[in-house]
Amino acid sequence: DTEVTQTPKHLVMGMTNKKSLKCEQHMGHRAMYWYKQKAKKPPELMFVYSYEKLSINESVPSRFSPECPNSSLLNLHLHALQPEDSALYLCASSQEGGANVLTFGAGSRLTVL
Amino acid sequence: GNSVTQMEGPVTLSEEAFLTINCTYTATGYPSLFWYVQYPGEGLQLLLKATKADDKGSNKGFEATYRKETTSFHLEKGSVQVSDSAVYFCALRRALTFGSGTRLQVQP
């Protein structure tokens, strides 16, 4: 299995809702990532987990809460989001180490009303 | 800090034309360098990478050479196809830093 699977593909939520994005990989990768991508922009790194521990948080607002329950799963919990948080959220995974390649999921497209 | 600068797009070419997309970087040391491609409605895929100076990455007819002296990693292809239409991102250090992306449109 050489894929990163993200669910849901599309999510529409109100500003008072609580929802979660999910990411799963079965490649034995020990690093997992969340990126946010706005239209016609590059992905912006949000969080990195290494061996199930949060290693990088790029000053992301607390309304985004990551969770890594085990080495195959990565969640992004969403609460009290703003319309400007609407974007494509990409999950990726890799082996640990500087030159290791990221494998990306297809993304979850989030719309906040 | 780390940064990547890519040429502005969109780049519009006719099929079989030669492609160059410029990428330069700022970083400490000798970071690994990558090109990723994003087709419409999809996530990113690795196109090629280079891990040290003078390395040449290549894949699907695309090539890029790690030039330490000019801190560059320009993407080239000798003959583009319509199916190459996508957004191309240069990236630094295991894709923790991306360039702004260059949209390529290839016309038949």
Image (tube, coloured by chain):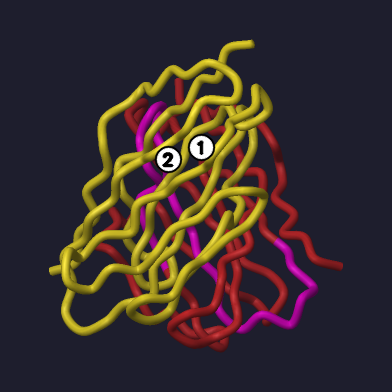
| Amino acid found under the numbered disc labelled 1 | Leu
What residue lies at 27% left-to-right and 81% top-to-bottom?
Answer: B30
Queried whether the magenta region covers residue A35, the answer comes back as yes
Q: Callout 1 environment at 10 Å: few (<14), some (14 to 19), or many (20+)?
A: many
Location of residue B31 in the rendering, given as x and y in whole percent from the top left corner: 31, 77
Queried whether the magenta region covers residue A108, the answer comes back as no
Secondary element under disc 2, as helix, strand or loop, is: strand
Q: CA distance from mark 1 to mark 2?
A: 5 Å
What residue lies at 72% left-to-right and 75% top-to-bottom?
Answer: A72
Secondary element under disc 1, as helix, strand or loop, is: strand
The N terminus of chain B appears in which quarter of the rendering? bottom left
Q: Are marks 1 and 2 in contact (CB under 8 Å)?
A: yes
What residue lies at 55% left-to-right and 19% top-to-bottom?
Answer: B106
Residue placed farthest to the top in the image?
Answer: B108
Q: Are marks 1 and 2 on the same chain?
A: yes
Location of residue A13 in the rendering, given as x and y in whole percent from the top left corner: 54, 29
Magenta part of the protein: which range? A24-47
**Sequence-earlier tag: 1 or 2:** 2
Location of residue A78 in the rendering, given as x and y in whole percent from the top left corner: 48, 48
Q: Specify the quadrant of the image occupied by residue A39.
A: top left
Q: What residue is pinned by disc 1?
A: A88
Q: Which numbered tag is attached to residue B105? A: none
Q: What residue is pinned by disc 2?
A: A37
The C terminus of chain B appears in which quarter of the rendering? top right
Q: Callout 2 environment at 10 Å: few (<14), some (14 to 19), or many (20+)?
A: some
What subunit carries mark 2?
Answer: A
Please tell me whether residue B52 is drawn above or below residue A10 in the rendered image: below
Q: Quick one: which chain is yellow?
A: B
What color was chain A assigned in the picture?
red
